Image (cartoon, helix red, strand yellow):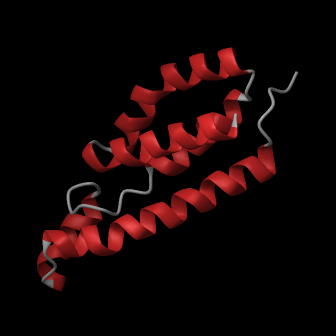
Amino acid sequence: PIAVLGAVVCLALTLGVIVSNNTTVILLAPMVRDICDRQGMDLKMAMLAVIYAANLSFATPFSYQTNMMVMPHGQYGFMDYVKFGVPMMLLCGAAALVATIAIWGTEASG
């Protein structure tokens, strides 16, 4: 279950760079529900991990509104977001995954 959850978090991180965080969660929710049913995982825990990961969109200027707002004022280029955003996404994504598993566990409750 941990590897499956890690893969779902990676998918949410990747998709969150391309589309908005809300869209990412909406697109992944049916798939996560099916995965949880098949793997016997807690749906609430898995969806929380997806929500956390979907909100870690630091890798491009257009992945979140405020990234675009500060770009001209800070004179940032596209690669500045990639250089600093990707490592930050990976670090925060790993922390969110570990914290979610530590707090919620992986087994379905009830």
Q: Is residue 17 above or below residue 109?
A: below
Q: Quadrant of residue 32?
A: top right
How far across and down, in percent of the image, does residue 75 sit?
12, 83
Left or right of residue 56, residue 106 in this image: right
Q: Percent position (x, y) of residue 99?
A: 71, 56
Count all numbered tags in the image, as a single digit: 0
Q: Residue 70, located in which quarter of the rendered image?
A: bottom left
At x 30%, y 50%, the residue is: 17
Looking at the image, residue 91 lies above or below residue 57: below
Q: Quadrant of the N terminus?
A: top right
Where's residue 35, x and y in %? 60, 21
In the displayed orientation, state which residue is furthest to the right.
Answer: 110
Image quadrant containing the C terminus: top right
* Vertical comparison of 5 with 57: above or below: above
Q: Quadrant of residue 77?
A: bottom left
Q: Residue at x 25, y 70 (%)?
A: 81
Name the foreground residue: 68 vs 16: 16
Q: Residue at x 30, y 62 (%)?
A: 59
Can you name the residue that lies furthest to the front here? 3
Q: Residue 96: x and y, percent?
A: 61, 56
Classify residue 7 as left or right of residue 42. left
Q: Residue at x 28, y 73 (%)?
A: 83
Q: Single out the residue that lies furthest toward the bottom.
A: 74
As drawn, 95 above or below 49: below
